[in-house]
Amino acid sequence: MAIIVLALSLPSDLAAAGPIDWPWKKKPPHELTARCAIEPSEIELGATGRLRATIEATDTHNHPVAYVWSGNGGVLSGTGPAIEVDASQVNPGVYSVQAAAQDAHKASATCIAQYHVRQPQTDAVTMSCRTEPEVVQVGAQVQVRAEANDQMNHELRYRWFTNGGEIEGEGPAVALRTTDLAAGVYTITGRVEDGFGGASDCVVSVAVELEPLPPPALPPPPPPEPLNIAQIVFGRNRQEAAPAELAPLEAVLERLRAEPEGRISIEAYADPDEREPQRLAAARAGALLRYFLERGIPQSRVATVVGLGGRRGGLRNRTVDIIWLPEGVQF
């Protein structure tokens, strides 16, 4: 019995590739995956810089892979695993770039990368101002204050204008002089600038009034006048009054004590038909003077006047009048 031995020879390129899988050894499944990215992922509207989109594909059998790119915004340029995107002409919004990877064995994978086009940050400058006070008299100063804000925190410069008066000072707080202005309403305009094109204005008004006229001078008070505050009637030819007849003098005494600046005048008379009328009138005045002196009233506050009554005076000729002399009235 003969034994036959077969010898197989392999092409040199296959031998170099390593051992061959035998039919009974199962190969791994064929799988293709992909991951996309784009840089930068956020730009400002109108930015001229190009975005770079990339895809990273993995084929488990290491087959060559081809790429196809598409997008819903911007202009795509280039081929292969990396391209550029020109988004300088698109409106603000979120856009996508899609890539598809495929090998010759119909394995494929897709991925998406997104980028955001936003409105550029504006250099907004705002300004408001106020006056203190809002109404002044001619010649007074008005304080003017501004509050300004710059989103980019630039250094701000202030300018002020007015259609009347004179601005004093600089910066966010100034003053308006109103000297020699006519009465009316005047406008103050403020402007703030950041040196980079950002600016804002504010306008306030101030009312200027004429100084009110002084009130008319009050007429001087009328001069104080003497006032008859008590009367004592003496009996005919008598120079002394009975105690009951002196009762009205108590009120006079109280007033003299309450008003130390006041004085009194005792004006005594006698009827021409009475005995020695001149002497009698003087005695009556002296009797009442003693009444006040004995009760502590200084003689400097009491004066006496003596006279004769008329022929038809009757009872009035025997009446002694107590006249109150207010402060400022001389004897």
Image: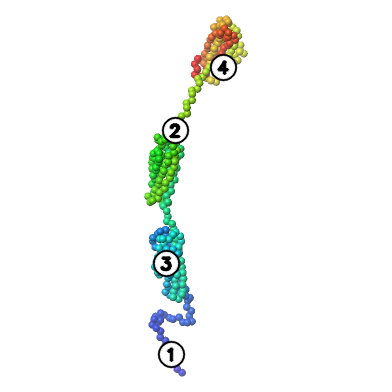
Observer-nearest of 125 and 75: 75
CA–CA distance in space, label 3 to label 4 = 122 Å
Secondary structure found at label 3: strand
Give the residue number, with chain letter if any, for mark 1: 5
Marks 3,4: beta carbons within 8 A = no
Please say whether residue 266 is visible from this viewpoint: yes
| Residue nearest the viewer, comparing 210 with 63 | 210
Q: Which residue is mark 2?
A: 211
Question: Which residue is found at the position 39% from the left and 45% from the top?
Answer: 158
From the viewer's side, name the closer residue of 125 and 26. 125
Tag 3: amino acid:
Thr
Query: Dot 1: what SS?
Result: loop
Mark 3 / mark 4, whichever is N-terminal: 3
| Residue that sits furthest to the left in the current view | 195
Q: Position of residue 273 (x, y in %)?
A: 58, 5
Label 1 crowd bin: few (<14), some (14–19), many (20+), radius 10 Å: few
